[in-house]
Each structure stands twice: as structure tokens, then as C-alpha cells.
Image: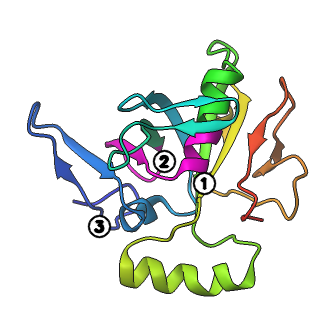
């Protein structure tokens, strides 16, 4: 199948309703949306995963921490992304559960990337590990809470912040709502 840009994309058929759907679980699958801004329309912890006092608790170690439903401009298809890294789960939990999104005024955007690590060794190992093993043991998701409509107003460009200043979307600035507005894993720049 072709996406909006004419490039081939990976799809899987969901057997219960025969609707085409993109499933992202392993990093190699997530790389389909590498460096693309996506809207999170649903965040659902799985198998009893939770956060207590800043610590991720997951009774099932072989199950993803959560599932997300994503909207990405690269495709019209439904995307289900499974959150398999503890820090990525912690940041999504902080945005959705601790901060409590005001759905009438705010939305959650994510940016997935295996390219923006601060440590030189992580940078050097990330691409080969992703290619050879299908994944890296590092977090890869930047989570942002934005005013409602930010995702729709953004073009396809995303300016990665050189530091932790307010993030820029094309020509518009991520305006402050309630703090914090975004979570960047410590290993990412």
C-alpha cells in the first residue's frame, strides 16, 4: 500500500474487524514514524501497569506497558503504538494521568526518534542496533502537551530543540499551558 507521500508502508490486518491498521511494537516498526510529529488520541496502560511515586510498576514483564492510538500525517490509517520502554511509559503517564489533560483545550503530541541521543556511544550504537537487532534499549519518545489544534496547525517539519527551550513547530511556538509541557528522556538531546 502507498501512503500520502507515495511511499510504501507496512500494514497489518486486524482480524476482528478486517480494518487495515499499522501496528508499532518493536523499534524497527516504530521507525516507520521516525522524526514525525504524531497526535496521541488514546493512552491505555496494559496488564496493570501503573506509576507510583515516580516508579513504574508492571506485574507482567513480557507485555508492553501501554498502547496508544496515534494520528500521523504520513498515513490515513489507524496506528496502534505499543509502549515498551519504561521511561516512555512514565512520560506518557505523567502527561495523561498525573497532569490530567484538559481535552477541550489541550492535546498530547509525541515525537519518536532513535537519532537524538546525548551520549556519543549511544549515538554510535543506536543505528546499528536498530538495523541488526530491531531495537535499542534506550527511550525514544518526546511527549508534549500542546494547545488543542497544534497538531493540525503544524506543517510536516518539526524543529528538534537544541536544548530544553520551548519547542518550535514550523513557525509557531509551543505556548505554555500548565507545567510541565513536555518530557524529554535524559539520554536524548
- The residue located at (64%, 38%) in the rendering is 55
Separation (CA) of disc 2 from disc 1? 7 Å
Sequence order check: which comes first, mark 2 or mark 1? 2
Q: Are the residues tagged 3 and 1 within 8 Å (C-beta)?
A: no
Reply above or below: 185 against 96: below
Inter-mark Cα distance, 3 to 1: 18 Å
**How many residues crowd around disc 1 within 10 Å: few (fewer than 14), some, or many (20 or more)?**
some
Sooner in the amino-acid sequence: mark 2 or mark 3: 3
Q: Which residue is pictured at 30% across the width and 62% down the height?
A: 9
Q: Which residue is mark 2?
A: 73
In this rendering, would 28 be left or right of 101? left
Q: Position of residue 26 (x, y in %)?
A: 37, 61
Q: Secondary structure at mark 1?
A: loop
Task: Report whether residue 149 is seen.
Answer: no
Residue drawn at the location 72% of the way across and 64% of the way down: 188
Q: Could you tell me which quadrant the N terminus lies in?
A: bottom left
Which sits in the foreground, 93 or 40? Answer: 93
Give the labeled residue for mark 3. Answer: 8
Image spot of residue 113 (x, y percent): 58, 63
Q: Which residues are magenta?
A: 72-91
Report x, y in % for residue 64. Answer: 38, 45
Q: Quick check: is 58 in the magenta stretch?
A: no
Q: Which residue is mark 1?
A: 156
Q: Residue at x 57, y 85 (%)?
A: 125
State the scheme by which the image is colored.
rainbow
Asked if the residue at tag 3 contacts the one at tag 2, i.e. Cβ–Cβ closer than 8 Å, the answer is: no
Marks 2 and 1 in Cβ contact (< 8 Å): yes
161 to 115, vertically: above or below: above
Amino acid at each position: 500500500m502507498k501512503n500520502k507521500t507515495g511511499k510504501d508502508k507496512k500494514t497489518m490486518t486486524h482480524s476482528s474487524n478486517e480494518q487495515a491498521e499499522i501496528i508499532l511494537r518493536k523499534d524497527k516498526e516504530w521507525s516507520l514514524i521516525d522524526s514525525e510529529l504524531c497526535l496521541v488520541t488514546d493512552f491505555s496502560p496494559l496488564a496493570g501497569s501503573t506509576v507510583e511515586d515516580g516508579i513504574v510498576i508492571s506485574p507482567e514483564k513480557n507485555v508492553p506497558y501501554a498502547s496508544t492510538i496515534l494520528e500521523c500525517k504520513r498515513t490515513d490509517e489507524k496506528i496502534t503504538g505499543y509502549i515498551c520502554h519504561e521511561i516512555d511509559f512514565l512520560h506518557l503517564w505523567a502527561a495523561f494521568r498525573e497532569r490530567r489533560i484538559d481535552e477541550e483545550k489541550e492535546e498530547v503530541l509525541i515525537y519518536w526518534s532513535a537519532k537524538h541521543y546525548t551520549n556519543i556511544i549511544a549515538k554510535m550504537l543506536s543505528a546499528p542496533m536498530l538495523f541488526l537487532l530491531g531495537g535499542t534499549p534506550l527511550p525514544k519518545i518526546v511527549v508534549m502537551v500542546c494547545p488543542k489544534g497544534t497538531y493540525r496547525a503544524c506543517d510536516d517539519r518539526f524543529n528538534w530543540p537544541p536544548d530544553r527551550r520551548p519547542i518550535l513547530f514550523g513557525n509557531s511556538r509551543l505556548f505554555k499551558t500548565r507545567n510541565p509541557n513536555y518530557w524529554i528522556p535524559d539520554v536524548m538531546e
